[in-house]
Image (cartoon, helix red, strand yellow):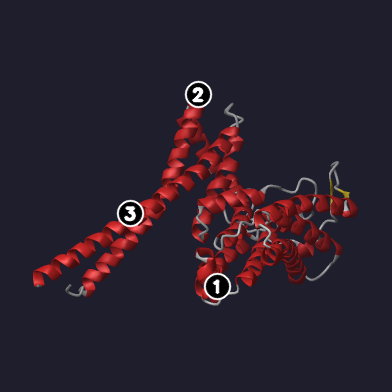
Amino acid sequence: MSPQTPDTFVNRLLGRIKLNGLMALAAPVLAILFAGLITSVVLILTDHPPVDTLLSMVEYGSTPRSLVGIINLASAYYLSAMAVALGFRMNLFNIGVDGQYRLAALIAAAVGGAVTLPKPLHIGLILIVAVAVGAAWAGIAGVLKARRGVSEVISTIMLNTIATGLGAWLLAQWAVPVAGSNNIGTNPIPESGHVPSIPLIPGAPNEVFGLFVVAVLVGIGFHVLLNRTRFGFNLRSTGLSEPAAVASGVDVKKMVIVAMLISGGMAGLVGMPQLLGSSYSYSLDFPPGFGFTGIAIALIGRNNPIGVAFGALLWSFLDVSQNILSLEKVSPEIVTIMQGVIVLAVVIAYELVHRYRIAAEQRRVSRELSASVGMEGAAA
């Protein structure tokens, strides 16, 4: 077979990259279109105009106030999804992000409300406590997995339940009445522990949480850790094939523990934008459920920092824009249906794209082999 010219090789390589990029983009786009179709059918069956309803959601979600709310909510969703994604890349299912971030937020709020320090030190202390608590709570599941072979799915689910009970008991011990309500919470964090908001959206009466920047840095750090470090290579190789990783000298048990510690540390940050940007105290109405939403968003984004960012923004857009549905006399549960269909459709679409990619690669190799055999026969 005659050698390929540089131009031929580059053209084939660019064509392959373009094809893979288009297929990767096709899966979420098809899933969103399919979810829109299913939602439209549901709206028609309930005597609501689908086009007008969806347009009203888009119009409401694009106002300055709503855009700020979307970004603030997406920050927590993104941090949660990235914590889940790190485990997914190693075939570890950290289902315990919900318990990890709530327990971390509670203890960090209690520590933050009990001390007074210069502003950078105060904020830094609260963040360190949150990361440490989240990492320690997830580390329990990591040790059980590495040392005793306990499934991290079972252990993290049970640790969620324990975190809920422990958090309720701790809050009862540390609680003080919240002024102007029947609520209770930890001592308010002094002003030195507040993170200034960012006036990111012109014309909005509210502002973006300052710790939105932390979510961006976590995404960058996730990419660098997994793609530019030896640890990231070991983590990805362990996720692809544990026997192969062991054969190449990777300490898989150590990797499990370290991966769970990092995942839990990231989970500890989930509640920080809300805590240090708005609430300044952990109370009974502190936002729940970020951990389980993060699992869905990690699936939508395929554990990729950029894909997860789009997934977090889409999910928070749907959550914020559903507020207009009550005024339109439409049940807000329509959004829940859309979110569920998106997750299901994305999983199916990615699997179909994956199978198509494998089949296309097999056909390409077959054509090249046939061409090679034909050229050798002609030369003979």
Earlier-in-chain disc, 1 versus 2? 2
Earlier-in-chain disc, 3 versus 1? 1
Rounded to the nearest angstrom, the CA distance separating label 3 from label 1 is 30 Å
Q: Nearer the viewer, mark 3 or mark 1?
A: 1
Q: Quadrant of residue 106?
A: bottom right
Q: Position of residue 345 (x, y in %)?
A: 47, 43
Q: Position of residue 149 (x, y in %)?
A: 67, 62
Q: Which residue is mark 2?
A: 45
Q: Position of residue 354 (x, y in %)?
A: 40, 53
Label 2, secondary structure: give it: helix
Label 1, secondary structure: give it: helix
- For the residues bearing labels 3 and 2, Cβ distance under 8 angstroms: no
- Residue found 66% across the figure and 68% down from its top: 257
Q: Dot 1: few (<14), some (14–19), or many (≥20) neighbours within 10 Å?
A: some
Q: Is residue 267 left or right of residue 338?
A: right
Q: Quadrant of residue 134?
A: bottom right
Name the residue type under label 2: Leu
Q: Position of residue 51 (x, y in %)?
A: 45, 31
Q: Quadrant of the C terminus?
A: bottom left
Q: Dot 2: few (<14), some (14–19), or many (≥20) neighbours within 10 Å?
A: few
Q: Which residue is mark 3?
A: 359
3 and 247: which is toward the camera: 247
311 and 9: which is toward the camera: 9
Name the residue type under label 3: Ala
Name the residue type under label 1: Val
Label 3, secondary structure: give it: helix
Q: Is residue 210 left or right of residue 238?
A: right
179 and 217: which is toward the camera: 217
Q: Which residue is mark 1?
A: 246
Q: Nearer the viewer, mark 3 or mark 2?
A: 3
